[in-house]
Image (tube, rainbow, N blue to C red):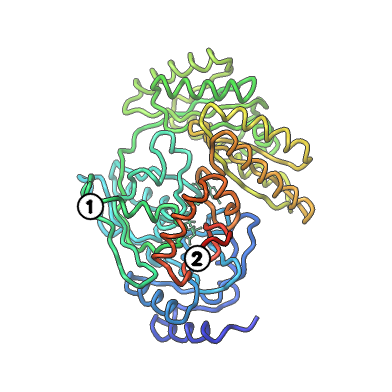
């Protein structure tokens, strides 16, 4: 497709402004930046730029605006709903991977200042290497960056203990607005009640309101953990055990549910050095400052499990045993994929109130079985956040997958839940937003978008539903 004249001018301006190695139209690089996981399709980018500083980002944003060329921030590219691609315009992919430094570490204050392109895994590795007994607990996909994590409103397995990106893990952020103006949302103090929380506007905004260029994140003590696992007659019993364990105050960092299909998948995949009972199972990470505390928690947890019909409670007393057990939880999503070579996968998530999780999982399992497609479900059970991995091989099957995803979102909404607990809206879930939030709330979101980005240049086609009340 020929490049529109205004885009060509923008690319010239980018080349004149940034260093030569910071602007590329190389086909391989464009393709890599256009392909994220999942089935949401998008057009390729026209150019990829690699800023190193906030000033570079300001220059890129100004060129984008002056030439009416859309812009889409790219972090780790691990998002799952077509976030990092353009839906139908092409444009500038702004890759923050060269803005990947920790700028300051304040151990006493329990925070650090970093650039947006650093990965959460890297931050924790660096803290560990430096012997600092703190860590950053939000844990989405490996490779996810701080900027992407803010923008998707992410969480992960640790959310049951530490909450999500919507908690207070991001103390402040420096953001380049579509106007080219740079704002810093607040200072570094732990608490602040000076006005409303402008940073929260950008959490989950998916790069549509501004580009994050610097962030202060809060850290928390890294405490020892151990792992326990138990089997249950069904998801309902597992869910009740999870709720009771949380409500009686057992110090749990993670409560993960793998359904019996996922457990069978683990056995067929055979990468965890053991055979598992093919039953709905809970994996717990117990956290505590001392071994005695952890063992006492494990004792209480075992009682809770058994009261709720669980069996084969296994507690890994050593770090090595704990790592071996947790490997099963970590391997489960990949096991499903590996068992069906050549198949494509749709990963989707929804979230419901804790007590509604069994109903949700029972409902969708009937549909998954009826579809005949290989499908594995697992859940961050402590949060009511269910994931389905559904595999397909051709366009007909892909249509079935879309129907299943629609059905799952519908079930979640009927149970007073959400169409996404952590992956976000992107392109794939725009259609559920009005039903979930109501048209007035969505209209407020659109008005904020219109105020900050009147030319609709920041990630057009994402997040905001396509209905015609306003121009987005
Ligand atoms: C195997 C796997 C497991 C996963 N598990 C989880 C999980 O447990 N929990 C969870 O929450 N997610 C999970 N995810 C999804 C994904 O890791 C998260 O959505 C993550 O937060 C995306 O971060 P990223 O850096 O990869 O962002 P990207 O994919 O690069 O971008 C995501 C969005 O953020 C915007 N963006 C990126 N950087 C910036 C910036 N600097 N300023 C403004 N906007 C920006 C992009 O434009 C885009 O809209 C998983 C993904 C995979 C592949």
Q: Residue at x 35, y 28 (%)?
A: 288
In the picture, the quarter occupied by the N terminus is bottom right
The location of residue 183, given as percent across then percent down, is 29, 64
Confirm or reject: label 1 Cβ below 8 Å from ligand 1: no
Vertical comparison of 181 with 190: above or below: below
Tell me where residue 175 sits by quadrant: bottom left
Task: Tell whether 402 sits left or right of 290.
Answer: right
Confirm or reject: label 2 Cβ below 8 Å from ligand 1: yes
Element under disc 2: loop
Element under disc 1: loop
Q: Residue at x 77, y 50 (%)?
A: 397
Q: Residue at x 54, y 79 (%)?
A: 25
**Dot 2 surroundings within 10 Å: few (below 14), some, or many (20 or more)?**
many
Tell me where residue 453 sits by quadrant: bottom left
Task: Tell whether 466 sits left or right of 18.
Answer: right
Task: Tell whether 186 sits left or right of 386.
Answer: left
Tell me where residue 176 sits by quadrant: bottom left
**Dot 1 surroundings within 10 Å: few (below 14), some, or many (20 or more)?**
some
Vertical comparison of 277 with 79: above or below: above
343, 471: nearer the viewer: 471
The location of residue 308, given as percent across then percent down, is 55, 15
The location of residue 362, given as percent across then percent down, is 66, 29
- Residue under label 2: 459
- Residue under label 1: 188
Task: Name the N-terminal-most of marks 2 and 1.
Answer: 1
The location of residue 352, given as percent across then percent down, is 54, 35
């Amino acid at each position: 497709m020929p490049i529109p004249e205004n885009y060509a001018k923008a690319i010239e301006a980018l080349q004149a402004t940034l260093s030569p190695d910071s602007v590329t139209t190389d086909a391989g690089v464009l393709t890599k930046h256009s392909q994220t996981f999942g089935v949401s399709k998008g057009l390729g980018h026209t150019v990829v730029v690699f800023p190193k500083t906030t000033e570079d980002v300001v220059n890129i944003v100004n060129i984008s605006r002056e030439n009416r060329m859309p812009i889409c921030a790219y972090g780790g590219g691990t998002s799952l709903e077509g976030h990092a691609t353009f839906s139908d315009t092409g444009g500038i992919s702004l890759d923050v991977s060269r803005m990947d430094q920790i700028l300051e570490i304040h151990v006493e204050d329990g925070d650090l200042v970093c650039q947006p392109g650093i990965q959460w895994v890297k931050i924790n590795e660096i803290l560990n290497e430096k012997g600092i007994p703190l860590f950053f607990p939000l844990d989405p996909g490996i490779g996810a960056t701080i900027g992407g994590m803010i923008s998707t409103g992410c969480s992960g397995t640790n959310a049951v203990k530490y909450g999500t990106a919507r908690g207070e893990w991001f103390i402040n952020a420096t953001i380049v607005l579509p106007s080219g103006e740079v704002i810093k949302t607040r200072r570094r103090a732990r608490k602040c009640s000076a006005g409303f929380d402008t940073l929260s506007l950008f959490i989950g905004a998916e790069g549509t309101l501004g580009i994050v260029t610097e962030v202060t994140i809060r850290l928390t003590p890294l405490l020892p953990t151990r792992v326990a696992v138990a089997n249950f007659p069904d998801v309902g019993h597992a869910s009740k055990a999870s709720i009771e364990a949380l409500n009686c105050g057992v110090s749990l960092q993670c409560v993960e549910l793998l359904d019996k299909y996922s457990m069978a998948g683990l056995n067929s995949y055979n990468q965890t050095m053991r055979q598992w009972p093919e039953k709905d199972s809970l994996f717990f990470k117990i956290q505590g400052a001392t071994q005695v505390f952890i063992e006492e928690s494990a004792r209480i947890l075992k009682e809770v499990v058994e009261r709720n019909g669980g069996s084969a409670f296994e507690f890994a007393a050593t770090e090595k045993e704990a790592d071996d057990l947790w490997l099963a939880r970590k391997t489960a999503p990949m096991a499903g994929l590996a068992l069906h070579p050549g198949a494509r996968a749709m990963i989707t998530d929804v979230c419901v109130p804790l007590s509604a999780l069994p109903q949700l999982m029972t409902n969708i399992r009937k549909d998954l079985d009826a579809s005949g497609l290989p499908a594995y479900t697992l859940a961050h059970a402590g949060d009511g956040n269910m994931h389905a991995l559904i595999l397909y091989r051709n366009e007909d099957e892909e249509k079935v997958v879309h129907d299943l995803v629609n059905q799952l979102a519908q079930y979640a909404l009927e149970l007073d839940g959400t169409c996404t607990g952590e992956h976000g809206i992107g392109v794939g879930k725009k259609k559920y937003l009005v039903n979930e939030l109501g048209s007035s709330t969505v209209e407020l979101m659109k008005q904020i978008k219109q105020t900050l980005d009147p030319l609709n240049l920041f990630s057009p086609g994402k997040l905001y539903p396509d209905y015609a009340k306003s121009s987005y």
